[in-house]
Amino acid sequence: MITLVWISLAGLTLWFAIVLARDFLAHRNALENSSWLKTSIIGFVVNFFDVLGIGAFAPQTALLKFTKQTKDKHIPGTMNVANTLPVLLQALIFITIIEVEPFTLIAMFVAAALGAVMGAGVVAKLSEKRIRLVMGFALLVTAFFMLATNMEWIQGGGEAIGLSQGKLAIAVIANFVLGALMTAGIGLYAPCMALVFALGLSPKVAFPIMMGSCAFLMPPASVRFIKEGAYNRKAALAMAIPGVVAVAIAAFIVKSLDLEVLRWVVIGVILYTSMVMLHAAFTKK
């Protein structure tokens, strides 16, 4: 079954790369006024620390907002499209090196993907004001989970590598919801890690589960954003390519860093960005 997962991820990677390339080439003469350099640096930085457990969506939102690289309305779609290829690589790596019970893994992957397809269709049609509201509250939720992790409020974890019966049902339902919310900019990593801990799974199991869930949900969700034209093509491609390089470096060379101070900095930046988003949503027409 793990071999089947590997083949599925490889197929998703090829399919998504073709869809993205076709859309970019079809609109290559009408690209957005974004900086190749700035967005490339953003893509590298957030995906590097994504592998190490920081998460990409919240800091990426902040950096895109601060550097004014895309419209607020297009931030969710741009992030989903930009991070799809890096996340697929993450999943291929961590599913290979960390053992998880196959049925648990696949059930949570499918649930997240179904949630994302439904969520992307809704988010792609939201107005800019509603996007700001959703993103503002999404960042608050993400900051809470990061704070809870830093303060060790999230307790639990065990030695199990799989779930069954009631716990599996809870995991599947929760991952469906997280998949839908991810398309709106709520990163899946932190809440998924909390879910894994609460259900008594080994903390290591969180990595292939959360990375694999994102890998299965992001291609179909991102293709939905691409077809709706609800993303910044130039910024997405500029972040995707360095993002893949960053994942390879973080996974195979760096592997681990002392990230406690960085997490506190990221929490502060996320909270500030959330306030900026919410202020704009309530004050601008």
Image: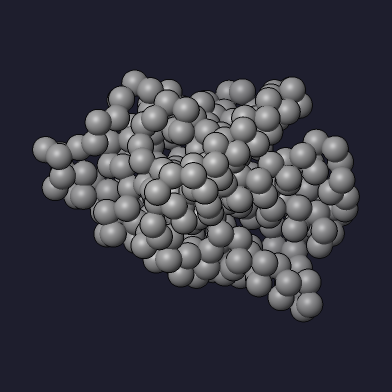
Instruction: In the displayed orientation, state which residue is furthest to the left.
Output: 29
Q: Nearer the viewer, residue 272 or 188?
A: 272
Q: Position of residue 168 (x, y in %)?
A: 73, 72
Q: Nearer the viewer, residue 271 or 59?
A: 271
Asked if 28 appears above or below 259 in the picture, the reply is: below
Answer whether residue 99 is visible to the viewer in this image.
Answer: no
Residue at 43% x, 66% y is 122
Q: Quadrant of the N terminus?
A: bottom right
Asked if 226 appears above or below 177 in the picture, the reply is: above
Q: Nearer the viewer, residue 255 or 48?
A: 48
Answer whether residue 27 is visible to the viewer in this image.
Answer: yes
Q: Quadrant of residue 151?
A: top right
All told, the count of numbered labels is 0
Q: Position of residue 190 (x, y in %)?
A: 68, 47
Q: Position of residue 194 (x, y in %)?
A: 76, 53
Residue at 46% x, 33% y is 65
Residue at 50% x, 38% y is 61
Instruction: In the displayed orientation, state which residue is furthest to the bottom.
Output: 165
Residue at 20% x, 37% y is 31
- Left or right: 31 as drawn, with respect to 44: left
Question: In the rendered view, how is the structure colored?
Answer: one colour
- Left or right: 120 as drawn, with respect to 26: right
Q: Nearer the viewer, residue 202 or 136?
A: 136
Q: Position of residue 12 (x, y in %)?
A: 39, 57
- Left or right: 230 as drawn, with respect to 186: left
